[in-house]
Amino acid sequence: MGILEVHHVVKRYGSKLSVDHLNLSVGKGEIFGLLGPNGAGKSTTISMIAGLLNMDQGEIRLDGISVKERPLEVKRKIGLVPQDLALYETMTAAENVTFFARLYGLRGKLLKERVQESLEFVGLQDKAKDAPSTFSGGMKRRLNIACAITHRPDLIIMDEPTVGIDPQSRNHILESVRTLNKMGSTIIYTSHYMEEVAAISHRVAIMDQGRIIACGTEAELRERVASEEKVVLSTSGISTDVVEELKLHPRVQMVEISENTLTITLPSAQQDLQDLLFICSKHEISIQSLKVEEPDLETLFLNLTGRTLRD
Amino acid sequence: MNIWHICIFELRRILKIRSVVLNLFILPLLLIFILGTALSSTMGTADDVIPDTVRVGIIHLNSESGRGSDTLNQALDTFVHSPAVAEMVKVQDFKTEEEAVHSLRTGKLDFAVMIPSDFEQNVMMGKEARLQWIRGKDSTLNTLGETLFTRFTDEWNRQMAITKVLGPEVIAAMVSSSESGAASSTNITVINPGKTGTAYSASQYYAASMLAMFMLYSGMTTSTSLFGERDNRTLIRLQAAPIGNGVIFAGKIAGNSLLAFLQATTIILMTYWFYGVDWGTHPWYIVLTCVFITLASMTLGVIVALVCKTTASASATIQGIIVAMTFISGGFMPIPIDFVQRISEFTVNHWALQSFLRMMLDAPVGEIVYSILMLGVVCAVLLLISGLIYRKAGYRYE
């Protein structure tokens, strides 16, 4: 049994089923990625876990404590990094962190120490006396995290924490997530960026239309689409004849054309690459570059739903 | 403990906003000074004695000569020539209402009294007899005129009642007594509405009305703050913390209430020290009145915040309500229209103003307490409405 257990959770908004009999389990000390497109139900799910929304059906337990029956106890163990920045722009960084930390019961000397630690952790110790209104987007995101971790929660929920920030700040945040995990926190990380989730999560759940459609480690999930690889050929020009002949190949599953680029989906690139190159040369297609793409979570999502994560 | 923590944080956060400090602390002091100085002529000063003469026109509707019966005339003469009244009243008789109204309009009269044609008949039949007023431009002189002639009517009714019971000899005895020059021992005494020989000044009036109005603006700050938590998404973080929704709400209301108290203290002390405004000798009643105004302000802010969809609409709504209430209650300028005064009795500003003015005039405690209690009733109604709306709508981040 994990630290977080979600059983048959349902949430409706009017006639729309936002979360549809969701089941998931998060182990203690892991980084659990929740991946899915916009509108999949990720934010609704974590809102229910954090006690912000009531569920219509089902049960959520954190460390064996029911969210429905003892919400305040559960909230004490959770640190929430919301998707939107939740900061008081006119108060200083230290005042923001201190205010929220007090709500979790921290006082006196311990409070001061933890506030200092949190700001150092996110790299804002020099900005403690400055107001977020003077911060860049990346700095605000980091302060957003600092406000959630001061009380050292057992479970940290991060809802798309890198939206709209520069790559440097994103990397800093991802590194912070790894460090928090090493310090003992269990983390639920939601995003619609496959690369981020794949990079840091121990396990990933793919969510769509309120349901978990796949769950496991990245290796396990790749296994599910191991039957597919993609060969991407950039050419100087494509003729319909070469496309038709490629499609006739017994092991080619799909041929996609985008301007002068051919994307050929087949079980194993290694096995049939020679055949593909022969067909192209027969039709005098000049190949400028060649790339073999291994299956990823995006491929898995596409397989399972017929849509891409960014749709 | 968390309520207190949220309260103090809220207060500190609001006081960092310059426009709040300007609108809630500086602007009222400025307005009190400007209005008190510019409109002092309409109200006089606290040091003025009631003018030597209030020019009163008496219209006898039952007589072509413009005078009533001998008995009534004698009683009126006795009354207006009594030492206390004679200092204050100069009487002129009119045959018709139109003539008196013309004199009021042209400023030749301050106040007019109409004696209905059935006045004496009602008295003799044992029915209550009342005079009718025609008010002039000056509310203070109107109040004085009403008070004096109400006193006359009450005394006249009393004497006629005694006569009816004990016989006409009593009247003769009363008339004889007045002819012997005992006019000074009239049975009719004059009771001033407040301090003997004083009235409230324009500065006092506007200090009271602006204090009430600007304390109500704290409700707008509350409403903006409640919306702000939602718009800035900080409400999500607050609701994710291990505290109840009620604690968040109570903390924010407490913070804004403290702000209102701070505002009231500043305005009262600054106007006392720098403008010489006398707030009377009932500090605890002032505190109680301010408590009720704060309660009204907060409940108004809560109602608007929970009903309106956006910050802009909430601000506009609450501003409109406050300005309307202030206007109707005579907070900008006294409005001597019965209908408007009746409506103003349903406003917070009316009872707040009445409470403060009565304290300033050192009115009997009963009058002060009555006004404060009525203010409390209005607040209780607002509190009930806000409670019902909160239960229905709640305060959530989405």
Image (cartoon, coloured by chain):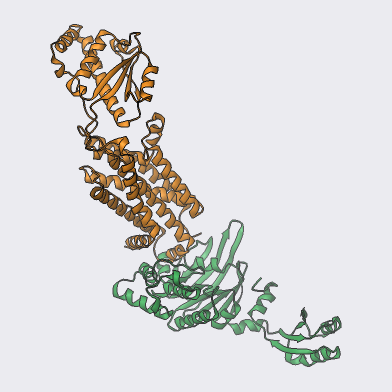
> Relative to the observer, which residue lies in front, A277 or B357?
B357
* Residue at the spot 35% in from the left edge and 10% down from the top edge: B62
> Relative to the observer, which residue lies in front, A242 or A248?
A242
- In the image, residue B81 lies at what x, y percent? 20, 18
* Residue at the spot 31% in from the left edge and 43% down from the top edge: B37
**Left or right for A238, reference A105:** right
> Relative to the observer, which residue lies in front, B119 or B8?
B119
**Left or right for A14, reference B57:** right
Q: Colour of chain B?
A: orange
**Left or right for B332, reference B84:** right
Q: From the rendered image, report the letter of the chain displayed in green.
A: A
* Residue at the spot 36% in from the left edge and 62% down from the top edge: B6
- In the image, residue A254 lies at what x, y percent? 77, 80
Q: Quadrant of residue A71?
A: bottom left
- Whether residue A65 is visible to the viewer of this picture, yes or no, is yes
The image shows residue B390, relative to residue A270, as above or below, that is above
Q: Quadrant of residue A111?
A: bottom left
**Left or right for B101, reference A56:** left
- In the image, residue B372 lies at what x, y percent? 29, 40
- Whether residue A64 is visible to the viewer of this picture, yes or no, is no
In this figure, what is the number of numbered marks? 0
Q: Quadrant of residue B56?
A: top left
- In the image, residue B130 lies at what x, y percent? 31, 18
